[in-house]
Image (spheres, grey):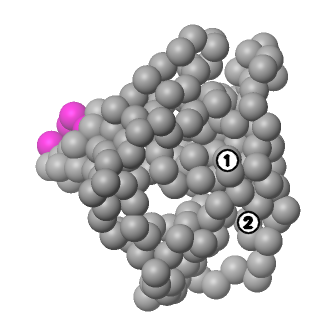
């Protein structure tokens, strides 16, 4: 496993529609492992292949099962996280109910935005071995997956944001 460079705007790969994965061989396995390590090091809750300069339909997501787990007071027992590695993910259903929430992105450092997202979605994809997977997601989890799948279509959260701002104390990158 190796850390990969996270590309930032205005890198052209972030605006391209990623190509479907057809080869589930060693190169894909290495990409997925590297993406997980890079996401954790960043740190982030999700990462799409275009964010590491690879125009393929691959995402990794890792988050706390329940938001309260993140604030687990028992330091001896770290809260469990759930890791997803998805290939060729597509949103097949989306709730009519929407909610605005704050988002940031590893490829747009120092910027936050209010983005309206579906409260619940269904995602069909393949796992890292090519087997079919269907996920029914809601709330924060659904938001993460929508954000990462947008990356596969060349869409950034700032494209969907109703308001964009720089958080206090954010360091501005020379991008």
Residue underneath mark 2: 8
Residue underneath mark 1: 152
Q: Can the viewer see residue 7? A: no
Q: What is the residue that sits farthest to the front in this orientation?
A: 96
Sequence-earlier tag: 2 or 1: 2
Give the x, y percent position of residue 118: 36, 55
The N terminus lies in quadrant: top right
Give the x, y percent position of residue 164: 50, 83
Residue 8 sits above or below residue 59 on the image: below
* Nearest the eye: 168 or 151: 151
Magenta segment's dominant SS is: loop
Mark 2, secondary structure of its residue: loop
Residue 162 sits above or below residue 31 on the image: below
Q: Can the viewer see residue 143? A: yes
Point out which mark residue 49 bears.
none
Tell me if 18 is positioned left or right of 134 in this view: right
The structure residue drawn at horizontal position 63% and vertical position 12%, both measured from the top left corner, is 129
* Nearest the eye: 54 or 81: 54
Give the x, y percent position of residue 168: 44, 88
**Residue 105, image quadrant:** bottom right
The C terminus lies in quadrant: bottom right
The structure residue drawn at horizontal position 29% and vertical position 33%, both measured from the top left corner, is 80
Give the x, y percent position of residue 100: 33, 70
Q: What is the residue that sits farthest to the right in this orientation?
A: 12
Mark 1, secondary structure of its residue: helix
Chain part drawn in magenta: 74-79
**Residue 128, image quadrant:** top right
Crowdedness near tag 1: few (<14), some (14–19) or many (≥20) residues, C-alpha within 10 Å: many
């Amino acid at each position: 496993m190796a850390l990969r460079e996270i590309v930032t705007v205005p890198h052209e790969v972030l605006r391209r529609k990623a190509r479907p994965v057809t080869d589930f061989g060693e190169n894909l396995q290495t990409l997925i492992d590297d993406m997980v390590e890079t996401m954790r090091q960043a740190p982030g809750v999700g990462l799409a292949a275009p964010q590491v300069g690879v125009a393929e339909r691959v995402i990794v997501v890792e988050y706390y099962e329940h938001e309260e787990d993140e604030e687990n007071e028992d330091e001896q027992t770290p809260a469990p996280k759930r890791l997803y590695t998805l290939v060729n993910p597509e949103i097949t259903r989306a709730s009519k109910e929407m909610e605005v929430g704050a988002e940031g992105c590893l490829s747009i450092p120092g910027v936050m935005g209010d983005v309206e997202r579906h409260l619940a979605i269904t995602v069909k994809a393949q796992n890292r071995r090519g087997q079919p997977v269907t996920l029914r997601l809601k709330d924060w989890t659904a938001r993460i997956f929508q954000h990462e799948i947008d990356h596969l279509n060349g869409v950034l959260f700032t494209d969907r944001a109703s308001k964009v701002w720089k958080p206090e104390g954010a360091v501005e990158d020379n991008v």
